[in-house]
Amino acid sequence: MKTPRNPGFKIFLIMLLSVPLFFVSDFYLHFQVYLSSNIITMVITQQWQVVVFFIIIFLAFLIPLSYRRKAQWVEYGLVTAFFVSLFVEMYGIPLTILLASKYFFVPGTQLPPNLLVINFMGVELGMDLAMLYGSILIIGGTLLITISWITLYRNSKDDNLVDKGIYAYSRHPQYLGFILVILGWFYGWPTPLTLIFSPILIYKYLKVSKKEEEEILKENPDYEEYKKKVPFLI
């Protein structure tokens, strides 16, 4: 039986992911407005400098500083397509919103109130509760990915299995980070695009995690003992 090595982190993550349950009405309104395309009245368009900036930032996460196995770039094609289409829709041409608005848009629909408004690269970005929550997930996921890569990079010259630092608490913290980022965009921008892509990408990362473990186990028998001590994600 595994002894929990990260009860505090696990409890914190469970509580963080449970936030929407405590603000059901706010999140419901947010999802209703976005999925019915009523957000068309507040959508940002033709801001290509913001599109390019975010695409570069998030695709940079796919550059392997050091992985536990050789990078399979074909596995990241779906992720690349997701981020490119996501940011083009958010700040360039909101194609799915424009198409859906012809069928679902209802004039006078109440939009979620903004809790925070920031000016970024000359564009005023407003965030309601769900978008702020999504941003927190994205920031948290980004930190996990960064810490994981740094840990792997610092130990890349060692032939032994990397089980130090954050890898002493999670076998796949980098994939957990990616999943949090995807969930963050899903909550913050719940359009037909993210509704379709998000579960597919999460499934993909879980599948890649399993495949990675099979490959490592063939090369390093010590990984079996590591699996008994450290949880899969949390």
Image: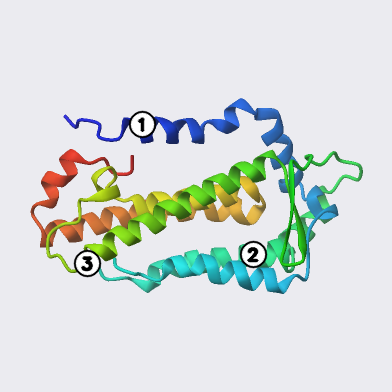
Res 30 label:
none
Of the pair 43 and 192, the residue shown nearer to us? 43
Res 8 label:
1
Which tag, 2 or 3, sits closer to the chain's start?
2
Dot 2: within a 10 Å radius of its alpha carbon, few (fewer than 14), some, or many (20 or more) residues?
A: many
In this rendering, which labeled residue sits more in front, label 1 or label 2? 1
Amino acid at dot 2: Phe
Q: Are marks 1 and 2 in contact (CB under 8 Å)?
A: no
Amino acid at dot 3: Ser
- Would you say 133 lies left or right of 169 here? right
Q: Residue placed at 70% from the left, 61% from the top?
A: 90
Helix, strand or loop for disc 1? helix
Dot 3: within a 10 Å radius of its alpha carbon, few (fewer than 14), some, or many (20 or more) residues?
A: some
**What is the x, y in percent for residue 161?**
15, 57
Q: Which residue is mark 2?
A: 87
Q: Residue placed at 48% from the left, 65% from the top?
A: 78
Helix, strand or loop for disc 2? helix
> In which image quadrant can residue 187 be found?
top right
Q: Residue placed at 87% from the left, 45% from the top?
A: 106
**What is the x, y in percent for residue 109?**
86, 40
Q: Which residue is mark 3?
A: 156
Which tag, 1 or 3, sits closer to the chain's start?
1
Does the rendering let one see residue 205?
no
Of the pair 69 and 122, the residue shown nearer to us? 122
Amino acid at dot 1: Gly
**What is the x, y in percent for residue 142?**
47, 55
